[in-house]
Amino acid sequence: MTVLAVSNLAKRYRRGGKPFAAVDEVSFEIGPAETLALAGPSGSGKSTIAKLVLRLIEPDAGRIDFEGGDFLALSGGSLRARRARLQMVFQDPLAAFNPRATVARVLDDPLRIHAIASRAERPLRIAALLERVGLETNLATRAIHEISGGQRQRVAIARAIATRPSLIVLDEAVSALDVSVRGQILELLLDLQRQERIAYLFISHDLGVIRAIAHRVVILDAGKIAESGDARTVIANPQSAVGKALVAATPKLVRTSQEAS
Ligand SMILES: Nc1ncnc2c1ncn2[C@@H]1O[C@H](COP(=O)(O)OP(=O)(O)O)[C@@H](O)[C@H]1O
Ligand SMILES: [Mg+2]
Protein backbone atom coordinates (compact mmCIF):
# COMPACT_ATOMS: atom_id res chain seq x y z
CA MET A 1 0.00 0.00 0.00
CA THR A 2 1.31 3.43 -0.87
CA VAL A 3 -0.04 6.84 0.09
CA LEU A 4 1.82 8.70 -2.65
CA ALA A 5 3.46 7.36 -5.80
CA VAL A 6 5.19 9.78 -8.13
CA SER A 7 6.43 8.44 -11.46
CA ASN A 8 8.60 10.04 -14.11
CA LEU A 9 7.62 13.51 -12.97
CA ALA A 10 9.02 16.37 -15.06
CA LYS A 11 8.74 20.15 -14.89
CA ARG A 12 10.53 22.52 -17.25
CA TYR A 13 11.13 26.21 -16.76
CA ARG A 14 12.98 28.71 -18.92
CA ARG A 15 16.20 30.32 -17.86
CA GLY A 16 17.56 33.12 -20.05
CA GLY A 17 15.04 32.10 -22.71
CA LYS A 18 16.30 28.49 -22.75
CA PRO A 19 14.18 25.66 -21.34
CA PHE A 20 15.69 23.57 -18.57
CA ALA A 21 14.34 20.74 -16.44
CA ALA A 22 13.77 21.84 -12.82
CA VAL A 23 12.44 18.31 -12.19
CA ASP A 24 13.53 15.48 -14.47
CA GLU A 25 12.21 11.89 -14.46
CA VAL A 26 11.64 11.80 -10.70
CA SER A 27 9.94 8.72 -9.20
CA PHE A 28 9.38 7.74 -5.57
CA GLU A 29 6.76 6.22 -3.26
CA ILE A 30 5.69 6.93 0.32
CA GLY A 31 3.83 4.41 2.47
CA PRO A 32 1.45 5.04 5.39
CA ALA A 33 3.14 6.59 8.44
CA GLU A 34 6.41 6.79 6.52
CA THR A 35 8.71 9.79 6.18
CA LEU A 36 10.50 10.28 2.88
CA ALA A 37 12.97 13.14 2.82
CA LEU A 38 13.95 15.11 -0.25
CA ALA A 39 17.45 16.50 0.12
CA GLY A 40 19.69 18.38 -2.26
CA PRO A 41 21.46 21.69 -2.74
CA SER A 42 19.59 24.94 -3.33
CA GLY A 43 17.99 24.91 -6.78
CA SER A 44 17.96 21.10 -7.10
CA GLY A 45 14.17 21.01 -7.52
CA LYS A 46 12.91 20.17 -4.01
CA SER A 47 10.29 22.92 -3.75
CA THR A 48 9.17 22.35 -7.34
CA ILE A 49 8.43 18.70 -6.46
CA ALA A 50 6.49 19.88 -3.37
CA LYS A 51 4.38 22.24 -5.49
CA LEU A 52 3.75 19.52 -8.10
CA VAL A 53 2.62 17.02 -5.45
CA LEU A 54 0.29 19.66 -3.94
CA ARG A 55 -0.92 20.59 -7.42
CA LEU A 56 -0.01 24.22 -6.92
CA ILE A 57 1.66 23.83 -10.33
CA GLU A 58 1.07 21.24 -13.08
CA PRO A 59 3.80 18.92 -14.40
CA ASP A 60 4.93 18.67 -18.03
CA ALA A 61 5.05 14.89 -17.72
CA GLY A 62 4.61 12.11 -15.22
CA ARG A 63 2.02 10.68 -12.93
CA ILE A 64 1.00 11.30 -9.31
CA ASP A 65 -1.07 8.68 -7.51
CA PHE A 66 -2.45 9.77 -4.14
CA GLU A 67 -4.37 7.34 -1.91
CA GLY A 68 -4.54 4.91 -4.80
CA GLY A 69 -6.04 7.25 -7.43
CA ASP A 70 -4.76 9.38 -10.30
CA PHE A 71 -4.39 12.71 -8.51
CA LEU A 72 -3.67 14.71 -11.68
CA ALA A 73 -7.01 13.59 -13.17
CA LEU A 74 -9.04 15.15 -10.33
CA SER A 75 -10.76 18.51 -10.66
CA GLY A 76 -13.54 20.50 -9.03
CA GLY A 77 -15.28 18.95 -6.05
CA SER A 78 -13.40 15.64 -6.18
CA LEU A 79 -10.05 17.49 -6.12
CA ARG A 80 -11.20 19.66 -3.20
CA ALA A 81 -12.35 16.60 -1.25
CA ARG A 82 -9.10 14.70 -1.86
CA ARG A 83 -7.03 17.78 -1.01
CA ALA A 84 -8.28 17.60 2.58
CA ARG A 85 -6.15 14.43 2.90
CA LEU A 86 -2.99 16.15 1.62
CA GLN A 87 -1.76 19.06 3.69
CA MET A 88 1.32 21.27 3.79
CA VAL A 89 3.61 23.12 6.17
CA PHE A 90 6.01 25.67 4.72
CA GLN A 91 9.10 27.38 6.10
CA ASP A 92 7.43 30.69 6.90
CA PRO A 93 3.92 30.59 8.41
CA LEU A 94 3.89 34.40 8.51
CA ALA A 95 3.83 34.31 4.71
CA ALA A 96 1.34 31.42 4.57
CA PHE A 97 -1.27 33.03 6.87
CA ASN A 98 -2.72 36.49 7.24
CA PRO A 99 -0.50 37.80 10.07
CA ARG A 100 -3.40 39.75 11.58
CA ALA A 101 -5.71 36.72 11.69
CA THR A 102 -6.21 35.11 15.08
CA VAL A 103 -4.97 31.60 15.76
CA ALA A 104 -8.62 30.53 16.11
CA ARG A 105 -9.41 31.89 12.65
CA VAL A 106 -6.49 30.06 11.04
CA LEU A 107 -7.69 26.78 12.58
CA ASP A 108 -11.38 27.46 11.92
CA ASP A 109 -10.88 27.78 8.15
CA PRO A 110 -10.13 24.12 7.31
CA LEU A 111 -12.84 22.89 9.71
CA ARG A 112 -15.39 25.12 8.00
CA ILE A 113 -14.21 24.75 4.39
CA HIS A 114 -14.08 20.96 4.56
CA ALA A 115 -17.26 20.81 6.72
CA ILE A 116 -15.45 18.82 9.42
CA ALA A 117 -17.32 20.32 12.36
CA SER A 118 -20.46 22.40 12.86
CA ARG A 119 -20.19 26.03 13.90
CA ALA A 120 -21.10 25.08 17.48
CA GLU A 121 -18.49 22.30 17.61
CA ARG A 122 -15.62 24.25 16.06
CA PRO A 123 -14.35 26.09 19.19
CA LEU A 124 -13.96 22.72 20.94
CA ARG A 125 -12.18 21.26 17.92
CA ILE A 126 -9.84 24.26 17.83
CA ALA A 127 -9.02 23.85 21.51
CA ALA A 128 -8.34 20.14 20.97
CA LEU A 129 -6.06 20.90 18.00
CA LEU A 130 -4.09 23.45 20.06
CA GLU A 131 -3.65 20.92 22.85
CA ARG A 132 -2.62 18.25 20.34
CA VAL A 133 0.30 20.40 19.15
CA GLY A 134 1.34 21.43 22.67
CA LEU A 135 -0.10 24.96 22.76
CA GLU A 136 -2.19 26.62 25.48
CA THR A 137 -5.83 26.93 24.42
CA ASN A 138 -5.84 30.63 25.40
CA LEU A 139 -3.52 31.22 22.43
CA ALA A 140 -6.65 31.01 20.23
CA THR A 141 -7.44 34.71 20.60
CA ARG A 142 -3.92 35.92 19.75
CA ALA A 143 -2.95 37.19 16.30
CA ILE A 144 -0.50 35.17 14.19
CA HIS A 145 2.02 38.03 14.20
CA GLU A 146 1.98 38.21 18.02
CA ILE A 147 3.16 34.67 18.70
CA SER A 148 6.68 33.24 18.44
CA GLY A 149 8.07 31.47 15.38
CA GLY A 150 7.91 28.10 17.13
CA GLN A 151 4.31 28.70 18.20
CA ARG A 152 3.43 29.73 14.65
CA GLN A 153 4.89 26.53 13.28
CA ARG A 154 2.85 24.55 15.82
CA VAL A 155 -0.27 26.40 14.60
CA ALA A 156 0.69 25.52 11.01
CA ILE A 157 0.94 21.86 12.05
CA ALA A 158 -2.41 22.07 13.89
CA ARG A 159 -3.98 23.48 10.75
CA ALA A 160 -2.43 20.72 8.66
CA ILE A 161 -3.80 17.93 10.89
CA ALA A 162 -7.27 19.52 11.24
CA THR A 163 -8.54 17.67 8.16
CA ARG A 164 -7.02 14.30 9.20
CA PRO A 165 -4.57 14.05 6.29
CA SER A 166 -2.78 10.87 5.23
CA LEU A 167 0.18 12.93 3.93
CA ILE A 168 1.76 16.25 4.91
CA VAL A 169 4.30 17.94 2.66
CA LEU A 170 6.78 19.91 4.77
CA ASP A 171 9.07 22.24 2.79
CA GLU A 172 11.96 23.44 5.00
CA ALA A 173 9.39 23.50 7.83
CA VAL A 174 11.99 23.58 10.63
CA SER A 175 14.80 25.39 8.79
CA ALA A 176 14.03 28.87 10.15
CA LEU A 177 13.75 27.71 13.78
CA ASP A 178 16.57 27.83 16.30
CA VAL A 179 18.04 24.52 17.38
CA SER A 180 16.06 23.87 20.60
CA VAL A 181 12.70 24.80 19.06
CA ARG A 182 13.58 22.73 15.98
CA GLY A 183 14.13 19.68 18.17
CA GLN A 184 10.74 20.16 19.85
CA ILE A 185 8.94 20.49 16.52
CA LEU A 186 10.65 17.34 15.20
CA GLU A 187 9.52 15.50 18.35
CA LEU A 188 5.95 16.73 17.77
CA LEU A 189 6.04 15.54 14.15
CA LEU A 190 7.34 12.11 15.21
CA ASP A 191 4.64 11.85 17.88
CA LEU A 192 1.85 12.84 15.46
CA GLN A 193 3.11 10.30 12.95
CA ARG A 194 3.07 7.53 15.56
CA GLN A 195 -0.41 8.47 16.83
CA GLU A 196 -2.20 9.38 13.60
CA ARG A 197 -0.17 7.34 11.07
CA ILE A 198 0.51 10.39 8.90
CA ALA A 199 3.08 10.11 6.09
CA TYR A 200 5.51 12.99 5.54
CA LEU A 201 7.22 14.24 2.41
CA PHE A 202 9.89 16.09 4.35
CA ILE A 203 12.00 18.55 2.40
CA SER A 204 15.20 19.86 3.91
CA HIS A 205 18.70 20.84 2.91
CA ASP A 206 19.85 19.73 6.40
CA LEU A 207 20.97 16.10 6.61
CA GLY A 208 21.11 16.27 10.42
CA VAL A 209 17.39 17.01 10.53
CA ILE A 210 16.70 14.36 7.89
CA ARG A 211 18.60 11.74 9.86
CA ALA A 212 16.49 12.58 12.92
CA ILE A 213 13.12 12.23 11.23
CA ALA A 214 13.22 10.39 7.90
CA HIS A 215 13.00 6.69 7.14
CA ARG A 216 14.21 7.07 3.56
CA VAL A 217 15.90 9.85 1.64
CA VAL A 218 16.01 10.89 -2.01
CA ILE A 219 18.97 13.11 -2.91
CA LEU A 220 18.38 15.43 -5.85
CA ASP A 221 20.93 17.01 -8.13
CA ALA A 222 19.77 19.49 -10.78
CA GLY A 223 16.25 18.02 -10.86
CA LYS A 224 17.35 14.37 -11.11
CA ILE A 225 17.58 11.70 -8.41
CA ALA A 226 21.28 11.24 -7.63
CA GLU A 227 20.69 8.47 -5.09
CA SER A 228 18.06 7.19 -2.67
CA GLY A 229 17.70 4.67 0.12
CA ASP A 230 17.46 4.17 3.86
CA ALA A 231 18.19 7.61 5.39
CA ARG A 232 20.83 6.52 7.91
CA THR A 233 22.58 4.26 5.40
CA VAL A 234 22.73 6.92 2.69
CA ILE A 235 23.88 9.63 5.11
CA ALA A 236 26.54 7.36 6.67
CA ASN A 237 27.88 6.30 3.28
CA PRO A 238 26.75 8.50 0.39
CA GLN A 239 27.56 7.16 -3.09
CA SER A 240 26.84 10.17 -5.30
CA ALA A 241 29.03 13.26 -5.63
CA VAL A 242 26.18 15.49 -4.47
CA GLY A 243 25.44 13.19 -1.52
CA LYS A 244 29.08 13.25 -0.46
CA ALA A 245 29.16 17.06 -0.76
CA LEU A 246 26.00 17.41 1.38
CA VAL A 247 27.46 15.16 4.08
CA ALA A 248 30.77 17.03 4.01
CA ALA A 249 28.88 20.33 4.41
CA THR A 250 27.23 19.05 7.62
CA PRO A 251 30.15 18.85 10.10
CA LYS A 252 27.98 18.16 13.16
CA LEU A 253 26.68 15.06 11.43
CA VAL A 254 30.14 13.50 11.30
CA ARG A 255 30.65 14.10 15.01
CA THR A 256 27.30 12.62 16.04
CA SER A 257 27.70 9.56 13.83
CA GLN A 258 31.09 8.89 15.47
CA GLU A 259 29.58 9.36 18.93
CA ALA A 260 26.81 6.91 18.06
CA SER A 261 29.15 4.19 16.80
N1 LIG B 1 8.54 29.73 -11.35
C1 LIG B 1 9.77 29.50 -11.79
N2 LIG B 1 10.21 30.00 -12.98
C2 LIG B 1 11.45 29.74 -13.44
N3 LIG B 1 12.34 28.99 -12.79
C3 LIG B 1 11.99 28.47 -11.61
C4 LIG B 1 10.68 28.68 -11.03
N4 LIG B 1 10.63 28.04 -9.83
C5 LIG B 1 11.81 27.44 -9.67
N5 LIG B 1 12.63 27.70 -10.72
C6 LIG B 1 13.99 27.18 -10.89
O1 LIG B 1 13.91 25.76 -10.82
C7 LIG B 1 15.05 25.24 -10.13
C8 LIG B 1 14.59 24.45 -8.94
O2 LIG B 1 14.03 25.34 -7.98
P1 LIG B 1 13.45 24.85 -6.57
O3 LIG B 1 12.54 23.71 -6.82
O4 LIG B 1 12.91 26.03 -5.87
O5 LIG B 1 14.77 24.31 -5.84
P2 LIG B 1 15.05 23.99 -4.29
O6 LIG B 1 13.77 24.03 -3.56
O7 LIG B 1 15.71 22.64 -4.29
O8 LIG B 1 16.02 25.05 -3.81
C9 LIG B 1 15.92 26.44 -9.79
O9 LIG B 1 16.89 26.60 -10.82
C10 LIG B 1 14.94 27.59 -9.78
O10 LIG B 1 15.60 28.80 -10.08
MG1 LIG C 1 13.13 25.15 -1.87
Image (cartoon, helix red, strand yellow):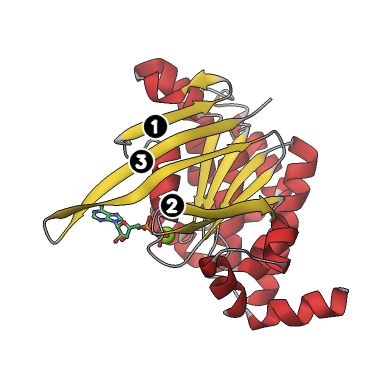
Question: On the rendering, which quadrant does ligand 1 occupy?
Answer: bottom left
In contact (CB < 8 Å): disc 2 and disc 3: no
Disc 1 marks which residue?
Answer: 62
Residue 216, position in %: x, y? 68, 50
Amino acid tagged 2 = Lys
Residue ID at (74%, 59%):
233
Q: Dividing the picture into quarters, in which one does residue 28 lie? A: top right
Q: Where is the C terminus found, in terms of image quarters?
A: bottom right
Which numbered marker is on residue 10? 3
| Pointer 2 or 1: first along the chain | 1
Note whether 255 is above or below 73 in the view shown.
below
Q: Is residue 140 visible?
A: no
Label 2, secondary structure: give it.
strand
**Does the beta carbon at disc 2 come under 8 Å from ligand 1?**
no
Label 3 Cα neighbours within 10 Å, binned few <14 / some 14-19 / many ≥20: many
Residue 260, position in %: x, y? 86, 74
54 or 100: nearer the viewer: 54
**Does the beta carbon at disc 1 come under 8 Å from ligand 1?**
no
Disc 2 marks which residue?
Answer: 224
Residue ID at (35%, 41%):
10
Amino acid tagged 3 = Ala
Residue ID at (67%, 35%):
124
Disc 3 from disc 1: Cα separation: 6 Å
Note whether 192 is above or below 77 in the view shown.
below
In contact (CB < 8 Å): disc 3 and disc 1: yes
Q: Dividing the picture into quarters, in which one does residue 204 lie? A: bottom right
Disc 2 from disc 1: Cα separation: 14 Å
Residue 254, position in %: x, y? 72, 79
Residue 51, position in %: x, y? 40, 44
| Pointer 3 or 1: first along the chain | 3
Q: Dividing the picture into quarters, in which one does residue 95 lie? A: bottom left
Amino acid tagged 1 = Gly
